[in-house]
Image (cartoon, rainbow, N blue to C red):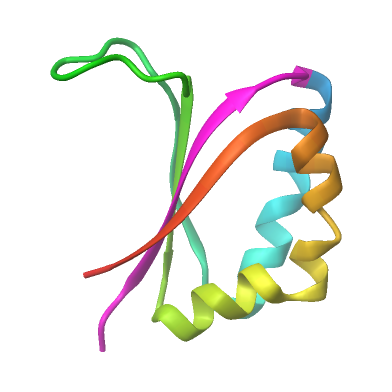
Amino acid sequence: MTAAYVVGRVSVKESHSWALYRGQVNATLEPWGGELLLRGRKVAALSAMDEQYSDIVAIRFPDQAAARGWFDSPQYQALIALRSNAADVVLTLYES
């Protein structure tokens, strides 16, 4: 089975709302076998051009179907408005 990873590049606009959003995301991952691997802040760009995103998140899922199921789930979709108010986020799905 091939694992799938959702990687989010994040630029926080409003820290209180971002904290509320982060506090609710983990519960949406559990039904889909999602595991939060990393939440971090950028320290420095070591190569290439610096980008606008200051934070990153990486979540592992058992497969692409689980990752897409999580993203499309009513539980996660209910958090999208809060996320959009809190931060600019680009989510990308990867497979290994």
Identify the residue shown where x is 34% and y is 11%: 43
Q: How far across and down, in percent of the image, does residue 21 sit?
A: 77, 41
Q: Nearest the camera: 37 or 95?
A: 95
Q: As rendered, which of 78 and 35 lies closer to the eye? A: 78
Q: Residue at x 66, y 56 (%)?
A: 26
Q: Quadrant of residue 13?
A: top right
Query: Is 4 located above or below residue 42 in the figure?
Result: below
Q: Pinpoint residue 31: horizontal percent, then vertical percent.
A: 65, 78
Q: Reply yes or no: does residue 96 show up in magenta.
A: no
80 horizontally vs 47: left or right: right
> Within the magenta stretch, is there residue 10?
yes
Name the quarter where the N terminus is drawn: bottom left
Residue at the farthest left position = 47
Q: Quarter holding the C terminus? A: bottom left
Part of the protein shown in magenta: 1-15
Relative to 63, 32 lies left or right: right
Name the residue at 54% across, 32% down: 10
Where residue 19 sits, quadrant-wise, is top right
